[in-house]
Amino acid sequence: DLRPLKAGVLHERETVRHAAWAAAAWTAPQHTLGGVRQRAQAGDPVAWHWLAVLGQPQDAPLILQAVQAMASGPQRCQLLARFGHPMAFELLMTWMAGEDVALAVAAREAFTRLTGQDIRGQRRAMPVADAADDFERDVAPDVWLPDLTRAAQLMAQHGERWREGTRWCEGHRLDGPMDAERL
């Protein structure tokens, strides 16, 4: 029963909602997933995060719906990486090949989080706004763009195996029983 945490999961501040969902996940895991699904369907981005962390394979359509509703490309990639479902690969490959540098970098990071494979390509400075001053231009962070050829090779080599699982992290399949060695 999530009643003791209701005020927290409905709170206006995101940090409070995150804390409430974390408490729910630790103290009432059997009730948390239903509640987080309900709040995610209502459009709460904090609930999307927790659904990605706690969700089951049947939550893939809801996660995909959340990804499409997000304005920020990098946040989309983070959500897909948290969920770890192979549905992410096609989107990540598309985003890595796009012109949006921040999205390509985030997609590369998500791909690496899922597969455990480093696909860093060219290093370059993050683009800055046209109206940026000299200081902002000087301190623009350096980022690693994805190596699209390497990513395509990995998908050709491992893609079928990766699509067989429903949850991946760092190249480890996490959708089955966990023994001590896998943990």
Image: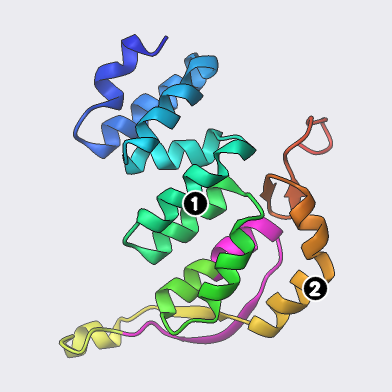
Query: Residue at position x 48%, y 60% from top?
Result: 77
Query: Residue at position x 53%, y 79% from top?
Result: 144
Query: Residue at position x 83%, y 70% from top?
Result: 157
Q: Position of residue 57 (x, y in %)?
A: 63, 39
Q: Quadrant of the N terminus?
A: top left
Instruction: From the viewer's side, name the closer residue of 54 and 69.
Output: 69
Q: Mark 2, residues whose alpha carbon is within 10 Å: few (<14), some, or many (≥20)?
A: few
Instruction: From the viewer's side, name the closer residue of 106 and 162.
Output: 162
- Using residue 159 as the reference point, say whether residue 14 is left or right of it: left
| Residue 142: mark | none
- Do the numbered discs 1 and 2 sit on residues whose CB atoms are within 8 Å? no
Which residue is tagged 1? 64
Q: Position of residue 117 (x, y in %)?
A: 71, 66
Q: Earlier in the sequence, mark 1 or mark 2?
A: 1
Q: Helix, strand, or loop for circle 1? A: helix
The amino acid at mark 1 is Leu
| Residue 20 falls inside the magenta stretch | no
Q: Position of residue 136 (x, y in %)?
A: 23, 82
The amino acid at mark 2 is Ala
Q: Which residues are magenta?
A: 108-127
The quarter holding residue 131 reads bottom left
Vertical comparison of 109 with 130: above or below? above
| Residue 112 falls inside the magenta stretch | yes
- Using residue 127 as the reference point, say whether residue 55 is left or right of it: right
Instruction: From the viewer's side, name the closer residue of 11 and 122.
Output: 11
| Residue 156: mark | 2
Instruction: From the viewer's side, name the closer residue of 168 and 59.
Output: 59
Q: Mark 1, residues whose alpha carbon is within 10 Å: few (<14), some, or many (≥20)?
A: some
Q: Quadrant of the C terminus?
A: top right
Q: From mark 1 to mark 2, how far is it between C-alphas?
A: 23 Å
